[in-house]
Structure formats: C-alpha cells, structure tokens
Amino acid sequence: MVPTPGSAVFLDTNILVYASFPGTLFYDAARARLSELENDGVLFWTSRQVLREFLASTTRPGVVVPPPTLEALTQAVRQFETEFEIGDEDAAVTAILLDLLKSRTVQGKQIHDANIVATMRRYSIPWLLTHNTADFTRYVPDIVVLSLISSGE
C-alpha cells in the first residue's frame, strides 16, 4: 500500500533532521524518499510539536556535526512552515490523545508519539513517514507507517 497523488503524509522529526543536514547518517535516504513522495504528488504535513522536536534534536551536542547555527535552524523551521501543512495542536488533538491513552499502553516519552498520531487523526492524515517505525506499530491500523528506507510497503 502506497500513498496516491493528493494523499496526506505526516513527516516525523527524524525525517526533517536527516533531510536538512548533509552530515547526518540518512541524509541521502531522506532526500530521496521525500523526492519520491513529492513526485508521487503527496501533500506533506507536520506539526508544531515536530518543529519543537526538530529544534531540540538539532541543538543536542553531536546530533548534527558541525552544529547548526541558530540562524540556520530558524531558516529551516520557517521553510518547513511554508513548504508543509502544519497541524496545530488544539482541544480536538488533546481529546484524541486522551482517547489513545485509554486504548493503548503508552507512557513516558511514548506520549510524544501518541500526540503525533492524535494530530494525524485530527487532520485526517493517514500516512506517517518515519525512520522509527517500531515506535508507531501500536497505532496501526489507525495510521499507515511508511519507512524511511523503502522496503516495498
């Protein structure tokens, strides 16, 4: 199962990090996967949470070498805001998140992933592109997880 033209695909934090910095381990794979999906005519989405996580990840020592400047990070986030649809967190996202917590065992840092799924459900986004596919398997069939490294989904 693959997204069709016009499908909404949510981009996880790791995709944005990898695709933004040539020195990251999966830079080429992320750029190629995004290009492939863009050529397929999908609509990219992300959220304010993911933008915050992008900033948190890229300012962590050793994640991006050399470390990006604040100016470069600001420019990247502003570019994401213009290139992608942004799912804002509102009361509906919180309500969906709380429902997800009732139906699955989720705790600690896993709440961040649950909030991504809640945002996806709020905005009717069926597809998630991530390198951390195992983190989201508990949410299938509510969402369809696309791997960064295509393995014939």
Image (cartoon, grey):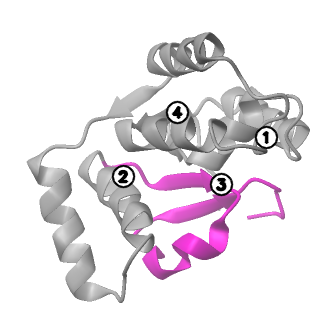
Q: Quadrant of residue 68?
A: top right
Q: Which mark is residue 30?
A: 1
Q: Residue at x 85, y 40 (%)?
A: 24
Q: Is residue 36 visible?
A: no
Circles 4 and 1: CB atoms closer than 8 Å: no
| Highlighted range, magenta | 124-153
Q: Residues within 10 Å of mark 2 (few under 14, many from 20)?
A: many
> Extreme front residue here?
61
Q: Earlier in the sequence, mark 2 or mark 3?
A: 3
Circles 1 and 2: CB atoms closer than 8 Å: no
Q: Residue at x 75, y 33 (%)?
A: 19
Q: Residues within 10 Å of mark 3 (few under 14, many from 20)?
A: few
Q: CA distance from mark 1 to mark 2?
A: 21 Å
**Residue behind mark 4:** 44
Name the amino acid type tagged 1: Ala
Q: Nearer the viewer, residue 60 or 34?
A: 60
Q: Residue at x 31, y 51 (%)?
A: 119
Left or right side of 73 for 138: left
**Residue behind mark 3:** 2
Q: Earlier in the sequence, mark 1 or mark 2?
A: 1
Q: Secondary structure at mark 2?
A: helix
Figure quadrant of the C terminus: bottom right
Q: Position of residue 3 (x, y in %)?
A: 60, 48
**Residue behind mark 2:** 120
